[in-house]
Image: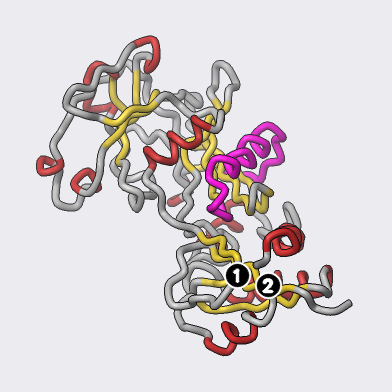
């Protein structure tokens, strides 16, 4: 079969190991002899690859923004940070279940019917992460603060703060992380805290110290691979809300009393490639008690199949 199209996989050193993308490229070549797969670095122009790939219709996949690599032609799918309020709005508009949310403005009014008794205050700044500066508080305690009133290193100085209804995942807080490529799961696991949270009727000061997400560091959480169909389906559905973003690191929570699922965010910036990002794979494999993170969904073969389908449909 003659080669008709190209696929370029763009990796960011430090965020994705080139060997991962080379493995995916080999799978593409074996499964689709009509597609030639290239691997390019996002740190250099890769001029030879650019010229070679420009000879045929091409699809470009990059987990994050393209930086130094700039293709001469092709359909581009690249990650990009999106402010959290925009994420929530787009998810809600697509009919995807998210906790009630609102930007904290000077005239904010939070109704009990919509937000219940407790809420979580978060930075809306797209680059804030790792659960930092997230505060659990009573709905009635929420008030507006100007950006200048926050400490110098607080993300509240760089963007809006917003509030979400607190979804109680139980005495031992938990959340799911599902990594999807064009809506297809590549990895899914659940973190559950080993430490019981205090009751919600403690003081405001004590509430502010409660972690609302389970943290793996320092062995504070139990981590397990999951195949829960409703979790995977909800995570997959986020792609229809942000279809320009190929790689989603979807955070999902399940309410303890009702079993209802909610999406917290999709982490669209591309910094979620758990298979080789920094020390993440070592820590995650140890927490999961597995030798490989790719076996759960045969991740690199699955990625190849998804990318083959996209390349055949959309290469330009």
Q: How many marks?
A: 2
Residue 311 in the image: x percent, y percent?
A: 71, 64
Span colored in magenta:
223-247
In this figure, which residue is indicated by the disc labeled 2? 57
SS class of the residue under badge 1? loop
Q: Is residue 40 above or below residue 145?
A: below
* Residue nearest the viewer, comparing 115 with 35: 35
Residue 145 in the image: x percent, y percent?
A: 15, 33
- Residue 296 covered by magenta stretch: no
* Residue nearest the viewer, comparing 56 with 233: 56
Contact between marks 2 and 1 (CB within 8 A): the answer is: yes
Residue 189 in the image: x percent, y percent?
A: 61, 45
Residue shown at the point (41%, 28%) measured from the top left: 197
Looking at the image, residue 250 sits to the left or right of residue 5; the answer is left
Q: Which mark is residue 74?
A: 1
SS class of the residue under badge 2? loop
Residue shown at the point (64%, 86%) measured from the top left: 52
């Amino acid at each position: 079969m003659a080669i008709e199209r190209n696929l370029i996989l763009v990796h960011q050193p430090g965020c994705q190991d080139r060997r991962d993308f080379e493995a995916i490229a080999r799978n593409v070549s074996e499964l689709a002899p009509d597609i030639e797969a290239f691997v390019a670095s996002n740190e250099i122009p890769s001029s030879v690859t650019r010229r070679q790939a420009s000879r045929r219709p091409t699809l470009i996949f990059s987990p994050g923004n393209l930086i130094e690599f700039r293709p001469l032609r092709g359909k581009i799918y690249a990650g990009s940070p999106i402010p959290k309020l925009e994420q929530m709005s787009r998810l809600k508009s697509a009919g995807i279940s998210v906790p009630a949310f609102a930007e904290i403005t000077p005239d904010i009014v939070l109704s009990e019917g919509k937000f219940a008794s407790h809420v979580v205050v978060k930075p809306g700044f797209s680059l804030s992460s790792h659960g930092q500066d997230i505060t659990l508080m009573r709905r009635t305690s929420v008030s507006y603060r100007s950006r200048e009133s926050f400490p110098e290193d607080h993300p509240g100085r760089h963007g809006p703060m917003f509030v979400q209804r607190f979804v109680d995942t139980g005495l031992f807080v938990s959340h799911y992380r599902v990594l999807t490529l064009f809506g297809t799961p590549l990895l899914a696991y659940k973190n559950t805290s080993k430490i019981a949270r205090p009751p919600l009727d403690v003081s405001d000061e004590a509430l502010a110290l409660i972690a609302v997400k389970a943290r793996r560091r320092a062995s504070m959480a139990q981590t397990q691979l999951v195949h829960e169909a409703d979790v995977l389906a909800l995570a997959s559905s986020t792609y229809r809300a942000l279809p320009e973003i190929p790689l989603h690191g979807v955070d999902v929570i399940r309410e303890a009393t009702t079993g209802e699922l909610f999406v917290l965010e999709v982490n669209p910036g591309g910094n979620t490639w758990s298979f080789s990002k920094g020390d993440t794979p070592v820590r995650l494999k140890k927490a999961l008690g597995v030798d490989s993170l790719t076996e759960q969904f045969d991740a690199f073969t699955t990625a190849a199949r998804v990318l083959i389908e996209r390349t055949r449909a959309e290469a330009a």
